[in-house]
Amino acid sequence: MTTYATLNPRQRLLMGPGPSTVPDRILRAIGSPTLGHLDPQYIQYMDETCQMMRDVFVTKNQLTFPVSGTGMAGMEAILVNLIEPGDEVIVCINGVFGGRMKDNMQRCGATVHVVEVPWGQTFTDEAIAEAVSKHPKATMLGIVHAETSTGALQPIQGISKIVHDAGMLLAVDAVTSLGGHELKVDDWNIDAIYSGTQKCLSCPPGLSPVSFSPAAIEKMEARKTPSQSWYLDVSMLKNYYTGGGASSGARAYHHTAPINMVYALREALQIVLEEGLEKRIARHRTVHLDLRKGLEELGLTYIPENSLSTLNCVATPEGINEAAIRTRLLNEYDIEIGGGLGVFAGKAWRIGLMGYGATHRNVVTLLSALKECMS
Ligand code: PLP
């Protein structure tokens, strides 16, 4: 019989594009006793988790819950419920994740109109206004708030007004912004939003916080065909997460919720709220500026328009083996950073400053290790 070594993962400093380092407090929460998914004590924890999610998304949306699955499951949950075959939709692509939205929209049977700017850039209100007026029959526009493949932070408010003036819904990817950047779902009039646990919430990967506005619910309730995904069908999921509406309170089994991951998310959200959203966002910004200064002192340059605090995308110097440096950082210093994706593959490093990991101490640790590896 094959014998296997005892599980003993190394303590790495996760400073890549995610997952980020998980604090012990959250790991301890995961290790709490597993309850049944209909146990009243668990339902209470789940309800509290959904309420804390509303607080962090800054929304009153009743339909706010954690999709069982990673950020991609959240993306799919939004698209398979809000798109019916034959719908026209618009998607904005300036990196990997807008491209994935397009792929998913097509799989939902939509006719997809693409607005594109070069990787690393963001969309102007004018570009969105032009796309919206060109495709007036579109029912929805999808856009990424924080493009993890490039470091671009997309302003949302101007776009939201244009999209709603045209009678469309706005769907937003907030995987790398929730808990690290300003994000106000109600004020910004976002109809459907998804995130992930493993970035600025510093949880392990496994859940995707999502939220749907009343207008999004109306669109889902008017569907002529059921969503092609059974697992992600919000019309059934809502009976478990919200008790089928504010009044009924009864919870219908749909799938066995990942109980211990919900504990982790609850703990993570509690940590965010204890710190305070504004303070947390300011911390990410301060630490990003620290890192930016240090990287520039090492002679590295940011990809133009890198406006995210949470993801720092820098061009790798000509003539160096960027992958070898990442391997040295991992093997000799137990530090993980990411390589470039797509058009930046082999040409960039992606350094995450997310949640618990966004500290001055981590910046200093990384900069000194990177300096050694580059010399
Ligand atoms: N959207 C963005 C902006 C991301 O950065 C990621 C993951 O890095 C995803 C979606 C997909 O999330 P996951 O890998 O958790 O499925």
Image: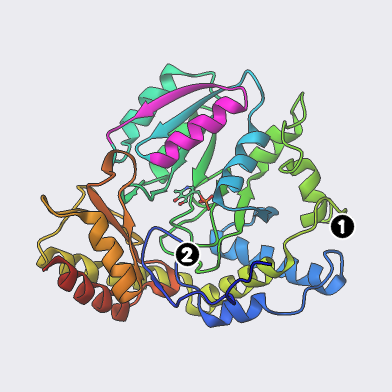
Front residue of 98/243: it is 98
Residue 288 image position (x, y, % from top left): 28, 67
Inspect the image, locate mark 2, and give the three-letter code of the amino acid beneath it: Gly
Quarter of the image holding residue 161?
top left
Q: Residues within 10 Å of mark 1 (few under 14, many from 20)?
A: some
> The C terminus lies in which quarter of the figure?
bottom left
Residue 235, by quadrant, is top right
SS at mark 2 in the image: loop
Instruction: Look at the image and tell me whether residue 189 can be seen.
Output: yes
Q: Nearer the viewer, residue 87 or 356?
A: 356
Q: Position of residue 335 (x, y in %)?
A: 34, 71
Q: Over which residues does the magenta segment extend?
A: 96-118
Q: Residue at x 20, y 65 (%)?
A: 292
Q: Which residue is mark 2?
A: 179
The answer to which image quadrant residue 134 occupies is top left
> Is residue 168 visible from the viewing direction of this image?
no
On the image, the x and y values in percent for residue 322 come to 22, 55
Taking the magenta stretch, the answer to whether it contains residue 91 is no
**Dot 1: element:** loop
Q: Dot 2: within a 10 Å radius of its alpha carbon, few (fewer than 14), some, or many (20 or more) residues?
A: many
The three-letter code of the residue at mark 1 reads Arg
Residue 346 against residue 92 in the figure, above or below: below
Q: Judge left or right: residue 186 versus residue 241.
A: left
Q: Which mark is residue 251?
A: 1
Q: Are marks 1 and 2 in contact (CB under 8 Å)?
A: no
Q: Residue furthest front?
A: 1
User: Looking at the rendered structure, which numbered label has been put on residue 372?
Assistant: none
Residue occupying the point 51% across, 30% down: 103
Quadrant into which the N terminus falls: bottom right
Against 368, residue 184 (above or below) is above
